[in-house]
Amino acid sequence: MQDKDYLENENENTTPDNVGQNTMDTKDDGQEYERFCFLCRRPESQTGKLITLTDGISVCPDCMQKTMDTIQNGNIDFSRLQGVNFLNLSDLQNMMPNQQQVKKKKPKKEEPRQEFDIRTIPAPHKLKASLDEYVIGQAHAKKVISVAVYNHYKRVATGTQDDIEIEKSNILLIGPTGSGKTYLVKTLAKLLDVPLAIADATSLTEAGYIGDDIESVISKLLAAADNDVEKAERGIVFIDEIDKIAKKKDTHHRDVSGESVQQGLLKLLEGAEVEVPVGASSKNAMVPLTTVNTRNILFICGGAFPDLENVIKERLNQKSSMGFQADLKDKYDKEPNLLSKVTVEDLRNFGMIPEFLGRLPIICTLSKLDKDMLVRILKEPKNAILKQYQKLLALDEVDLQFNDGALEAIAEEALKRDTGARALRAIIEEFMLDIMYEVPKDDNIGRVTITREYIEHRGGPVIAMRGVLELEQQD
């Protein structure tokens, strides 16, 4: 009878009227605390509504279901357990430790969203002037990009105000390695203060194969926008190494990282609603999905296209003939900027499908860097490499100088390596290693001058002591 009365009391405490009551506890300090499941110790914010068994004792639905399943399956035979009596749940009220209670989180106040204002978009000439402070040379490329970006964000700001719908103008950048394609896009996104995602086309594969899905490009943009969908839909996506997804020639296998990727990118370039995972690069059952519309996202594709010059030469040499005043077949072998003569036909022969090229209406070529441009890159930009090292040594109160001969020697060595501006930092890192190691040893060193002889390993840098510098200033 006593057990029967106990079970009746239990049924009264677990009726639906008690479910969800007292969802939070309030202490003397006025703070609200979450309740925990007595069995699994998870808070109510994770388990859902807790089932109140008695005052201070609550169980989550999962644990309650597991307990009932265990009893129904007959896994526990209470008759065979000696010395085990039914417990009174009221005796367990003080067994929950207070230090594991968690304060309830208050909902954050959402800040009002700022509408995209067309007046905040810099004019093309202002945008190019800002790019000139960071990017040396490539005047034509900066002009083309400035106009294209200005028109694109005017299109985003105006929306569909009338029946005339402005189509999106994505950009294809073609230039040799180290010519500044990626740096140009990074600087552009920084000036416009919009989220930027840089993806590598070499890692993209067709859905279902090992590698990144095509939607992962938008996932990176969403992450750059702090998971703000509205902000991400006004961002810029730069897909580098786009030439690596050209159609494979003379292959009998499925081209999962070439033509298939180009076809998969078509819907993103033109504009479509894509479901992408939040906070992850691939879809799975544990990651929530959100929908991003790519209609107002500016796509910029870039690549070196190393064999494209041969395709251009083949097309231009078709006009060659024999006889006096005829074009010779080796006429374009020493052409410095042969990429500037590229056409859509050349890109199709290279391996890009027509549908993909049709969604990249603006084709912009970057010229190869020459000696004078490399010297300017060393010293003129706001964040020039030389200025970075001068600032590092200035923290040790040492003046670092480079004479003109040293700058020319660095540029000449960079041209030999044929990797563009990337070679400049590698060269400077080599000869600055000993200086950055030795200078902090002697506090009397006041100035270090880098010469051509030091760059060419025919001498050392010119070092001036602080006392000599003080005499020169007094004179």
Image (cartoon, rainbow, N blue to C red):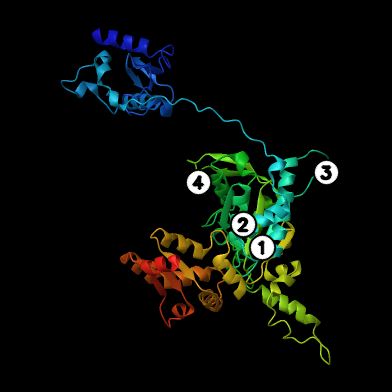
Question: Which secondary structure lies at badge 2?
Answer: helix
Would you say residue 430 is visible in this rendering?
Answer: no
Mark sitting on residue 280: 4
Calculate the distance from the C-alpha at mark 3 to the C-alpha at mark 4: 38 Å
In screen coordinates, is 292 left or right of 358? Answer: left
Would you say residue 361 is visible in this rendering?
Answer: yes
Of 226 and 241, nearer the camera is: 226
- Mark toward the viewer: 3 or 4: 3
Mark 4 is on which residue type? Ala
Residue 413: % across, % down: 52, 78
Question: Which secondary structure lies at badge 4?
Answer: loop
Mark 2 is on which residue type? Val
Mark 3 — residue?
164
- Residue 110: quadrant of the picture: top right
- Which residue occupies the extreme left position in the image? 83
Question: Which secondary structure lies at badge 1?
Answer: strand
Instruction: Judge whether 56 appears above or below 437 on screen.
Output: above
Calculate the distance from the C-alpha at mark 4 to the C-alpha at mark 2: 24 Å
Calculate the distance from the C-alpha at mark 3 to the C-alpha at mark 1: 28 Å
Residue 4: % across, % down: 28, 9
Question: Which secondary structure lies at badge 3?
Answer: loop
- Which residue is rendered at x = 64% and y = 57% of the image? 131
Q: Are marks 3 and 1 in contact (CB under 8 Å)?
A: no
Instruction: Judge whether 380 appears above or below 106 on screen.
Output: below
Task: Report the number of numbered marks.
Answer: 4
Mark 1 — residue?
173
Mark 2 — residue?
185
Q: Are marks 2 and 1 in contact (CB under 8 Å)?
A: yes
